[in-house]
Image (cartoon, rainbow, N blue to C red):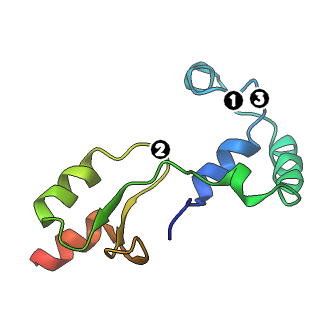
């Protein structure tokens, strides 16, 4: 059963220095020192996975209409780029991306 998702973006977000919030990064002329990001990435290796994972997942059941999945994909929050699909028992059976829906139509 899905409890969380680890993405490259969620890892990178944790590796940014604490002062580098989103609003500050938008106005900065240069980003944080890459060595500090690498040091923070190295420190994450010893952290439990639940510190890094996103636990607010977009999950649908197998019988969810494709149009509803498309609406969820358009409005995704966080780092995820997919919707997880579970069976009636809540067991993960797959994931759907926007690309999957487009490819299905072509």
All told, the count of numbered labels is 3
Residue at 71% in and 43% down: 14
- The residue labelled by disc 2 is 78
Position of residue 58 measured from the top left corner of the image (x, y, whole percent): 38, 54
Q: 31 or 89: nearer the eye?
A: 89
Which of the labelled discs sits on residue 53, or is there none?
Answer: none
Position of residue 9 measured from the top left corner of the image (x, y, whole percent): 58, 52
- The residue labelled by disc 3 is 18
Give the structural element (helix, strand or loop) at label 3.
loop
Which residue is at the far front? 89
Corner quadrant of residue 4 = bottom right
Give the structural element (helix, strand or loop) at label 1.
loop
Left/right placement of residue 51 relative to residue 55 reads right
Which of the labelled discs sits on residue 30, or is there none?
Answer: 1
Give the structural element (helix, strand or loop) at label 2.
loop
Who comes first in sequence, dot 2 or dot 3?
A: 3
Left/right placement of residue 75 relative to residue 43 reads left
Residue at 24% in and 74% down: 62
Q: CA distance from mark 2 to mark 1?
A: 24 Å
């Amino acid at each position: 059963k899905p409890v969380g998702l680890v993405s490259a973006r969620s890892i990178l977000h944790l590796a940014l220095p604490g002062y580098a919030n989103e609003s500050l990064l938008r106005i900065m002329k240069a980003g944080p020192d890459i060595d500090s990001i690498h040091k923070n990435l190295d420190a994450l290796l010893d952290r439990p996975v639940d510190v890094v994972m996103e636990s607010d997942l977009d999950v649908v059941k197998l019988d969810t209409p494709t149009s509803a999945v498309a609406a969820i994909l358009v409005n995704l929050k966080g780092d995820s780029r997919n919707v997880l699909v579970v069976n009636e028992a809540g067991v993960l059976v797959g994931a759907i991306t926007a690309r999957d829906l487009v490819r299905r139509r072509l």
